[in-house]
Amino acid sequence: MDIYFESSWSILSSIGIANFLFGLIIVSITRLSVVVAVPLVVSLATALANGLCYYAFYQKHPPLQAAVASVFADIFWLIQEAGLSFYGYVILARVLPRQEKRLFVPIFWAIVAAITGCRCGIAAMRVQAVVSGDDSYQHIISSLHTGYFVCIALLEVVSAVFLLRKFGSAKKASQNASIRTGLLKHFMRGTEIRLASLALIGVSRAITYFFQTSLQAASSTASQLDRFIYTLECVYPMMFYIDVLASRIKFTGSSQEQSYGVNQAGQSAKVKSRSTPRRTVHQYPGWQELDDEHAFPMGLTSVSRAAPTDSTTIRATEEARRTGASRTGITKTVEVNVTKAGED
């Protein structure tokens, strides 16, 4: 029997604990919110699952105790591995229009149900294997793992497709409204990276676990490769923390640029107008955090852009010059109104 801290499970469990502590630091910077809670819960589940795995399969305990530990390990593995995709779900639940949400939510939860069913089957087969001491169940367990990881990859692909469509249409609308799109590009790039990496992890583990020959031991080249890929999965919550902090920095920079533009417009607004402007409405994602506005993208912003009907320009009002356009937005050309997501 190996000493706990001489085994790989202790390292994986320690990674989960470290990620959880890093998450608490992120909370102290940005406040606790749903998007930060996802990697926090995933990290805690990582630590518990790997510790229970060592208890169940690498120490000598009565079969009943080992079987109970095995079941709880599978539950926490389910939370860890399926929980990664809830990061995208939290965003989509806020930014998707009502019609698209009616399509996305049932698909998402149907795949989650399939993932849960596969993991319950794995847990049941492992209990049989632990109680009976028979390794013949391993073939069934490996087959269930194949379907399990394929479903996880599919879940991330579905979330990424909806996210990229939303950000893509928002970017196009923002360009039409002459609005800076740096923050949109950041979120599109982050979504693409999550799609590629999580889908790759799911497919790779589906392939490598198919060749697993023992319950938990890395006794073959394929199982050692699977252990390496799982290690990357344990580290993955760090990407969410980076995304949250980068979003906050990017949002702060965009807000400062917009504030500077508003002040400049208020100081130099001297233009002429002969007719009432017509308005065209554009929608793009506004960047408001779930619980803390100024930290993460949520909600929809409706932009009414005034466009003159002829070549003449608009004369600023005396009130706009006095207030510096600080309350009504950029009164030279743009009025900004914030509406909540889902009010389509």
Image: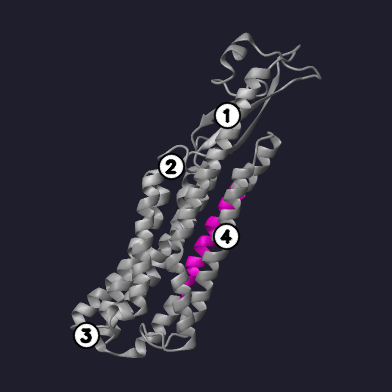
At a point 60% along the width and 31% down the height, the residue shown is 258
Q: How is the image coloured?
A: one colour
**Going by the image, does 171 lie left or right of 99?**
right
**Image: 14 above or below 105:** below
> Residue 221 at what x, y percent from top left?
49, 87
Q: Residue 153 in magenta?
A: yes
Q: Which residue is mark 4?
A: 193
| Label 4 element class | helix
Give the Cα distance between marks 4 and 2: 22 Å
Q: Which residue is mark 3?
A: 60
Q: Residues within 10 Å of mark 4 (few under 14, many from 20)?
A: some
Q: What kind of residue is marked 3? A: Lys
Q: Residue 132 in magenta?
A: no
Mark drawn on residue 259:
1
Q: What kind of residue is marked 4? A: Ile
Which residues are drawn in magenta?
Answer: 146-166
> Residue 275 at what x, y percent from top left?
74, 13
**Going by the image, does 65 lie left or right of 314?**
left
| Label 1 element class | helix
Q: Which residue is mark 2?
A: 290
> Residue 20 at what x, y percent from top left?
35, 59
Do the CB atoms of the residues marked 4 and 1 lie less than 8 Å apart? no
Give the position of the N terminus as an image quadrant: bottom left
Tell me which numbered mark, 4 or 2, is placed earlier along the sequence.
Answer: 4
**Going by the image, does 15 lie left or right of 182?**
left
**Image: 332 above or below 248:** above
Q: What kind of residue is marked 1? A: Ser
Q: Residues within 10 Å of mark 3 (few under 14, many from 20)?
A: few
Give the Cα distance between marks 1 and 3: 65 Å
Q: What kind of residue is marked 2? A: Leu
